[in-house]
Image: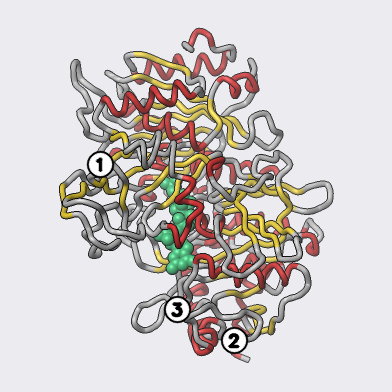
Amino acid sequence: MNVQELKHPGLKKWVEEAVALMSPDTVEVCDGSKAEYDRMIKITVDAGLATPLNPEKLPGSVLFRSDPSDVARVENRTYIASQREEDAGPTNNWINPAELKKIMTDLYKGSMKGRTMYVIPFSMGPVGSDIAKIGVEITDSSYVVANMHIMTRVGTKVLDVLGSNGAYVPCFHSVGKPLGPGEKDAGLWPCAPLDKKYISHFPETREIWSYGSGYGGNALLGKKCLALRIASVLARDEGWLAEHMLILKITNPEGDVKYITGAFPSACGKTNLAMLIPTLPGWKVETVGDDIAWMKFGKDGRLYAINPEAGFFGVAPGTNNESNLNAMESCKKNSIFTNCGLTEDGDVWWELIGHGAPGKEILDWKGNKRPAPKTDKSPKGEEIAHPNARFTAPARQCPCIAKEWEDPAGVPISAFLFGGRRPKTIPLVNQARSWIHGVFMGSIVGSEVTAAVISDQVGQVRRDPFAMLPFCGYHMGDYFKHWIKLGQSHDESKLPKIFFVNWFRKNDEGKFIWPGYGENSRVLAWIFDRCSGKGKAQETPIGFLPTLDAITPPQGVSQGDMQELLKVDIEGWKAEIADVRKNHYPKFGDKLPKELYAELDAIEKRLNA
Ligand code: GTP
Ligand code: SPV
Ligand code: MN
């Protein structure tokens, strides 16, 4: 479809202005068809950017290798450009919107020369449902078009819903690598240098401008940019929640069903928990979403969640048939792999995939030949797959996708889980005493920074409130207030119960004490029971912890380990609270709700009692 055929005058004008600014060779409006997807893949293969994989092992799938400077989200190049700096708050990068638009307009000038501009109409949430939001992404990357086909609902059906005057979030994206006459990508992932990359959000005008990166959340603008950073602003204004949460359906042996969401920072186990295969007999987990939840109140006063996405952009390393069989099955066909190793027989390989690689040699994520590994591990720092290597797979291919996953009404949530990677102090599971106590605990969550972000802090613990530190489109202090207000204005007995989990406790030798993955079902079962008014617990200064007999230890976990996992480390918590008081809360100044300081005082008092 060409631009002239667009029936929405505002959209048409916006596209025409973008064409004038970015000077692409041609323009195409995406229809969302399979033929279009196949053509995008062919274009990337012909450009030497994608390698088709062995059709007997991974039919319809390809592997991309990105530029080493473009392997993950770039938080220090991500901006919330609200009119006033204080509205972006202390945890976001801010530039005056007019100034930022000027800088970026200069970068966009002629940035698509030698390329095709694709106009991608997409829907976050089922097309046409009340809860869905429409975006239109303009991009010069066929890799982005193909990924958006999997991750969102794309094409003519979205334009039909938009009609001639529907609202949409305009999203600019350019990889920032125009081509000269006769120039081709010739196998080199196009992007701009780090100091030219900008991932920008204009919350008041609901616009997204991204430049210079082709990777993941920097480029697939429906995901973090729209469904979290912009949507969190809409949610604040309209009284709902846009959160970095998986959504799972859990059924107990009696056949009772509950839905649980969980917010863990990037690469901290959302996809895995969402697809977990319980080791506890008789329990079943099914997937509604693995990364983002939009939640609104139903007429019955309960919170209902939908997954706005249509696919998974999952971390490859660590994924194997034991840890996450359902993810392995989801990406067995029609999938896009990025920055994995390539075996001699045209298969993908990554660290902890569960087996060595066949043959003599393997191509690593940079395209270098290396000896084929005989086990499923490589020495740290010499990984064959990049630690943030990813698969893009359609959600409908997931064997455990819940039948409700596309229900526009959403699913009623019984529990929120929060957590992160904490080698010490934080217990395996802990239930908040109340909504406000849960909000307090959510506001102080800490986690080790993972390879999902380009940062020199990788491995260090940082505070990542609600797993939203990189994704909240406004002042975090106001975000805390929003959560508190939701609790105050609704019947608390109908709100989800709040729990804190930590699958990542380590012993003094640096080994995980808790086996995680399917064994996490033991914790989910306790949470399920707590939501039914059952499940044995003891009150402690930090919340309700399971009694020692409430969770049967998995094989290989001793009673001593369980004691360690479920004890309250009073000294550790005192240090934690002191750090919050000294370093975390003061950042938010006057915007830190007084209710949270009251909780801080109260927990301190309980720890000192
Ligand atoms: P994003 O897509 O970045 O938001 O990540 P995510 O939160 O979905 O994390 P994911 O489930 O992909 O897990 C990231 C890494 O943590 C993978 O290497 C997993 O194998 C590992 N992991 C997940 N769950 C567990 C667990 O229970 N225990 C341990 N030890 N590792 C886990
Ligand atoms: C995350 O970093 O939380 C992701 C990957 O889910 S990305 O889409 O790149 O943000
Ligand atoms: Mn994520």
Q: Mark 2 points at which residue?
A: 607
Q: Do the residues labelled 3 and 2 touch (CB within 8 Å)?
A: no
Q: What residue appears at the point 78 percent right and 63 percent down from the top-left corner?
A: 492
Q: In this rendered view, identify the residue nearer to me: 583 or 507.
A: 507
Label 1 or label 3, whichever comes before in sequence order? 1
**Disc 2 residue crowd, few under 14, some 14–19, many 20+, Cα 10 Å:** some
Front of the two marks 3 and 2: 3
Splitting the image into 4 quarters, where does residue 440 fall?
bottom right
Q: Mark 3 points at which residue?
A: 513
**Callout 1 amino acid:** Asp
Q: Position of residue 239 (x, y in %)?
A: 71, 47
Q: Where is residue 346 in the image (x, y as percent from the top left)?
A: 28, 41
Q: Where is residue 284 in the image (x, y as percent from the top left)?
A: 64, 60
Q: Distance between the residues labelled 3 and 2?
A: 25 Å
**Callout 3 amino acid:** Ile
Taking the image as shown, residue 111 lies to the left or right of residue 505, namely: left
**Mark 3 sits near ligand 1, with its Cβ under 8 Å away:** no
Front of the two marks 2 and 1: 1
Q: What residue appears at the point 27 percent right and 63 percent down from the top-left corner?
A: 375
The answer to whether residue 480 of the structure is visible from this angle is yes
Kindly state the secondary structure of the residue where label 1 is placed: loop
Label 3 or label 2, whichever comes before in sequence order? 3
Q: In this view, does 218 lie above or below 529?
A: above
